[in-house]
Structure formats: structure tokens, C-alpha cells
Image (spheres, rainbow, N blue to C red):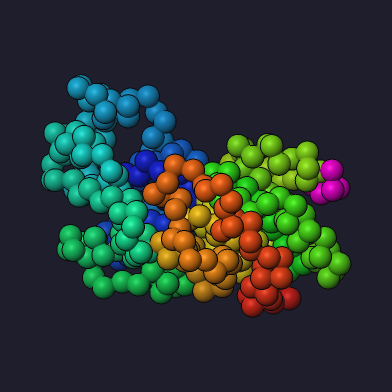
């Protein structure tokens, strides 16, 4: 099987449960996606091989003439699933594939309050590719197997903090994260800040508070580092989804995005979001409202309450 996904880290991590379910029925699964994400999926044992979507010849899937390399690649697979909104991509694949491509939108319609992972699994069941499956069970079983195979050297005092996100709209104020780090340090813990490559705007303020900022060019290195932490606190982001998937005790702070759709799957995940009357608007509005209480009203106390609910001094 070949899986195609055009999304970023968080979107692809939410397909991991579907891939785990598919592995029960297919001996080999490869993926075509962003190169860094593909390497991560291989390292985690979820897929056998990754093809980088950035390779120039894959652009021909969106042109009138498909490159011979792409035709040769696609013809090797007996089944292709494209997690994509693009009907043109589906049509292009069907021109050269031996069997019809199953195209599944990577997320449910914006106002449908169904979790993304469950939506993907339901579509795979409807397509006859898997039997009944539950995201939570799939992820938990994988975590237990992966931890057994890989082993983990964990410093439970290291608490990883990610104050960024793929969108500035989803960021809890940085000063709250800095206050959070101070309280964690007063508790005898070691707060460790991590930022993504597009979040350099946060560096100066974090370092001004005498905190180091960790940054990784390879997602595989980031995953290795995350696994050594005792806990994790961050915004709704790709890194948060990865941390939860790897089994860290996680607190994820939500603002305008909907936790009913985007909560990272995992047995040790707590969500913080203020109780508000307005519906989450991240996917239905182009910008936050003038006074985004969803982003600013989550209190430090609520975050620590959630943290105390998942954190233990030693992780097995």
C-alpha cells in the first residue's frame, strides 16, 4: 500500500492510528509526504519506506503530464490511499494506478465535531480496508509495543514546554509559559523550552528569562529528545501531537481550535480551554475576534491543575 498525505506534522500524526490499523491487513505500507515527516514515520516503525513529497517530479501529479518516475512508482502498489482534499490528485493517480485510489479528506467538515482520527478510521471501515477500530486503543497498544522495543532513558524532572504553534492564533501568551517555567523550577523540576523552525520570534523573550531554547532540524532527533522528558506542556501544535503519540504525560492548551476534533490521542493527555459560550472558530474564520478570550483566559492555575493530573515523578 502507498499512503499519500500533503499535510504538516500534526495532520500526519493524526493519521498514525489509521496506519496502525492498516498494518494489520497489509504486509508493507509506504508513504509519500513531507520528507521530514516521512523519515519520522519510518523511524517509528509505522511505515516501511517514505518518499519525499518535495521531490520535483512529484509536482507532475498536479500537471497535465505525469513524470515517468511517478508513473513507475505508483504502478508498484496494489492499493493507494490519498488523505487529500484534491480531486485532481485523485484523478491523476487513477490515470497510472492499477486499482482505483481511495481519496479520504484529511479532516471532517469544519463544523462536524468528530475527532479527526476517528473520522479517518470510519472512512477506512466504510471502504472495507479495516475492521472496527478505536483511536485510543490503537495508540495505546502501539505505545506499549514501541516502548518495549526501543527502551527509554527518561529524566522525569525534565518538563518540555513548547510555546509556539503552526499558527500564532493558537498561542497561549508567552509570558504565561515563562511564569509556568518559573513555578516548575520552584518545584524542583527542569523546564526545557523547544521551538520549531518558524518560531524564532519567541527566542529573545525566552532567553531574556535565562532559558535555553532547543531547536531541531530533524524530526527524528526531536522525537528522540521528547522521549527523554518526564512531561510536556504546549499549545495545539504538531509537536504536541507528536509528544502525546510518543506517550509523554501532556497538557495541551487550546484556544480557537476545537479539542473535540483535534485533541492529541493518548492515555495521558489533559486539555485546557476556558469555558466559553462561543464555538471554536479557527477553521471557520480567517482571524480571531478582537478579544480572543479563548486564547488569553486559560489560567496558570488551570494548567497546573491539568499537569498535576497527568504527571508522576517517574515514568515506566
Residue 173, compared with residue 229, is above or below; it is above
Residue 41 position within the rendered picture, expressed as x and y whole percent measured from the top left: 45, 51
Whether residue 45 is visible here, answered yes or no, is no
Residue 71 position within the rendered picture, expressed as x and y whole percent measured from the top left: 22, 31
In the picture, measured across the screen, residue 57 lies left or right of residue 128, that is right
Residue found at x 42% / y 57%:
14
Residue 201 position within the rendered picture, expressed as x and y whole percent measured from the top left: 69, 37
The foreground one among 120 and 277 is 277
Q: Does the magenta-highlighted stretch encompass residue 210?
A: yes
In the picture, measured across the screen, residue 24 lies left or right of residue 182, that is left
Whether residue 312 is visible here, answered yes or no, is yes
Residue found at x 44% / y 42%:
286
Q: Does the magenta-highlighted stretch encompass residue 116?
A: no
Residue 16, compared with residue 308, is above or below; it is above
Residue found at x 75% / y 52%:
175
The residue stretch that appears in magenta:
208-212
* Quadrant holding the C terminus: bottom right
Residue 199 position within the rendered picture, expressed as x and y whole percent measured from the top left: 64, 39
Quarter of the image where one finds residue 17: bottom left
Residue found at x 18% / y 45%:
101
In the picture, measured across the screen, residue 71 lies left or right of residue 281, that is left
How many discs appear?
0
Decide whether the magenta segment is chiefly helix, strand or loop: loop
Outermost front residue: 290
Residue 201, compared with residue 189, is above or below; it is above
Amino acid at each position: 500500500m502507498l499512503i499519500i498525505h500533503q499535510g504538516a506534522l500534526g495532520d500526519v500524526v493524526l493519521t498514525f492510528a489509521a496506519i496502525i490499523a492498516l498494518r494489520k491487513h497489509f504486509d508493507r505500507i509506504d508513504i509519500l509526504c513531507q520528507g521530514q515527516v516521512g523519515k519520522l514515520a519510518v523511524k517509528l516503525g509505522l511505515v516501511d519506506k517514505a518518499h519525499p513529497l518535495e521531490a520535483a517530479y512529484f509536482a507532475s501529479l498536479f500537471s497535465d503530464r505525469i513524470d515517468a518516475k511517478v508513473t513507475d512508482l505508483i504502478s508498484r502498489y496494489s492499493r493507494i490511499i490519498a488523505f487529500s482534499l484534491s480531486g485532481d490528485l485523485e484523478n491523476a493517480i487513477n490515470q497510472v494506478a492499477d486499482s482505483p485510489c481511495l481519496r479520504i479528506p484529511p479532516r471532517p467538515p469544519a463544523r462536524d465535531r468528530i475527532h479527526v482520527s476517528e473520522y479517518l478510521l470510519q472512512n477506512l471501515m466504510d471502504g472495507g480496508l479495516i475492521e472496527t477500530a478505536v483511536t485510543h486503543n490503537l495508540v495505546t497498544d502501539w505505545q506499549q509495543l514501541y516502548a518495549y522495543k526501543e527502551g527509554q532513558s527518561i529524566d522525569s524532572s525534565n518538563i518540555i514546554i513548547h510555546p509556539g504553534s503552526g499558527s500564532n492564533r493558537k498561542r497561549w501568551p508567552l509570558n504565561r509559559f515563562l511564569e509556568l517555567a518559573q513555578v516548575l523550577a520552584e518545584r524542583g523540576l527542569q523546564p526545557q523550552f523547544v521551538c520549531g523552525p518558524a518560531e524564532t520570534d519567541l527566542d529573545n523573550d525566552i532567553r531574556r528569562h535565562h532559558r535555553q531554547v532547543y531547536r531541531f532540524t530533524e524530526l527524528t532527533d526531536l522525537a528522540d529528545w521528547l522521549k527523554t522528558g518526564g512531561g510536556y506542556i504546549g499549545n495545539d501544535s504538531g509537536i504536541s501531537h507528536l509528544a502525546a503519540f510518543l506517550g509523554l504525560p501532556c497538557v495541551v492548551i487550546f484556544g480557537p481550535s476545537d479539542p473535540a476534533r483535534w485533541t492529541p490521542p493518548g492515555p495521558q493527555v489533559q486539555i485546557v480551554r476556558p469555558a466559553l459560550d462561543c464555538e471554536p472558530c479557527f477553521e471557520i474564520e480567517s482571524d480571531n475576534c478582537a478579544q480572543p478570550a479563548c486564547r488569553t483566559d486559560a489560567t496558570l492555575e488551570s494548567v497546573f491543575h491539568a499537569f498535576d493530573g497527568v504527571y508522576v515523578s517517574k515514568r515506566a
